Amino acid sequence: MPFFRRICATDGEIFWGVFSESGLEDIKGRIVRGEYLGIYEEKKILFEDFATEYLEYSKANKARSSYRRDTTSFKVHIIPYFKGHYLAKITAKMIQDYKTQRAQQANVATVNRELCALKNCLRKAVEWGYLKENPASEIRLFKERPKPPRYLEKEEIAALLDQCPLHIYPIVVTALNTGMRRSELFHLEWSDIDFKKRMITVRNKDGWHTKNHESRVIPMNDFVYEVLEKHPRHINSNYVFYNHDGNRFDNITHGLDGAAKRAGIDHICLHTLRHTFASHLVMSGVDLPTVQKLMGRKDIEITMRYARLSPDHLKAAVERIDWHKSGTNAQGQQKRHQDHQALSAPNY
């Protein structure tokens, strides 16, 4: 939503400007820091102390998995490297040196995740008035070659389901037929399922939120509908997938690994089942924006990784503009063919 604001320039001229919410927040931050008055003074705080403060923010505002990644990146690598330096003394050169060193120790995907975590941390330092500028703003990430998502073939799906223990079978079926994330599955409650409309609603709850903080609705096909309708409820729990105490499941790695091994499938996880759902949708001709919506993704670039799985679908799309088959073009081609025959006929 745009905002109109009265701005006084340094020469005293007054004019009106339009700002976005993010732009308005940036201006507020500059006012708090005293930048417009020329009295800006960076706060003295050690990097490790600010990083600890940032991790508290990450814990309160990010998904659990994102917070865990931040914690690992900072406590294992970033904090030890920058420890002892004042936050305001961190330079772009120091960050570039960190990038170079870590590239010799880990793959580019890992280094990029750490750099993103550091960039976000320093961005908050600017927003909170600890820094005037983000020294990591111009640091470029390594180029990554995206790996094709791993998915199960139909024969592997059948073999896996045959080998699933009873207590994880409904979870695996739901994952394969809805594409829900691990945390979404384990926080699914009976109140989220509408059996009359055959819909599952993935929504935020007290103490937990979806990855992008947005709700979405996923239709149930016959398979998942029948499995969930027959799935028994726990007398003391509203969770759909629960252990013997009625508490929600938090991990089925052991059971899933065992089922995969018995089915002759290499190590998989619940995220593999999510990829399987998306991959088979695309191979069945479902368009990518629809897949993106069902998966609950904000960025279609990630969904585009599945595009390579739909050559027949792409071929059918291109054939819709095959001018060779159009009526008007056929008439023109027939005339050219007749002219060509006339020119090439022997002249006795």
Image: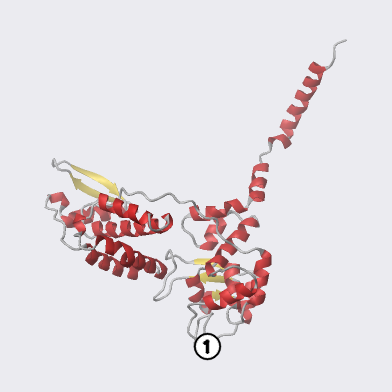
Where is residue 37? Give x, y as percent: 12, 50
Q: Residue at x 62, y 73 (%)?
A: 224
Where is residue 251? Give x, y as percent: 49, 77
Residue situated furthest front in the rendering: 104
- The answer to which quarter of the image holds residue 149 is bottom right
Q: Amino acid at mark 1?
A: His
**Disc 1 target residue:** 244
Task: Tell me the crowding category of disc 1: few under 14, some 14 to 19, or many 20 or more residues within 10 angstroms, Cα based.
Answer: few
Q: Residue at x 50, y 68 (%)?
A: 181
Helix, strand, or loop for circle 1? loop
Residue 223 sits above or below residue 23 on the image: below
In what quadrant of the picture does the C terminus appear?
top right
Residue situated furthest right in the rendering: 348
- Tally of numbered discs: 1
Q: Residue at x 40, y 70 (%)?
A: 64
Question: Can you see residue 134?
Answer: no
Left or right: 28 in relation to 292 = left
Where is residue 28? Give x, y as percent: 22, 56
Q: Nearer the viewer, residue 312 or 1?
A: 312
How is the rendered protein coloured?
secondary structure
Q: Nearer the viewer, residue 82 or 162?
A: 82
Question: Can you see residue 291?
Answer: yes
Residue situated furthest top in the rendering: 348
Where is residue 166? Give x, y as percent: 61, 82
Left or right: 168 in relation to 28 = right
Left or right: 7 in relation to 238 = left
In what quadrant of the picture does the N terminus appear?
bottom left
Residue 348 sits above or below residue 226 on the image: above
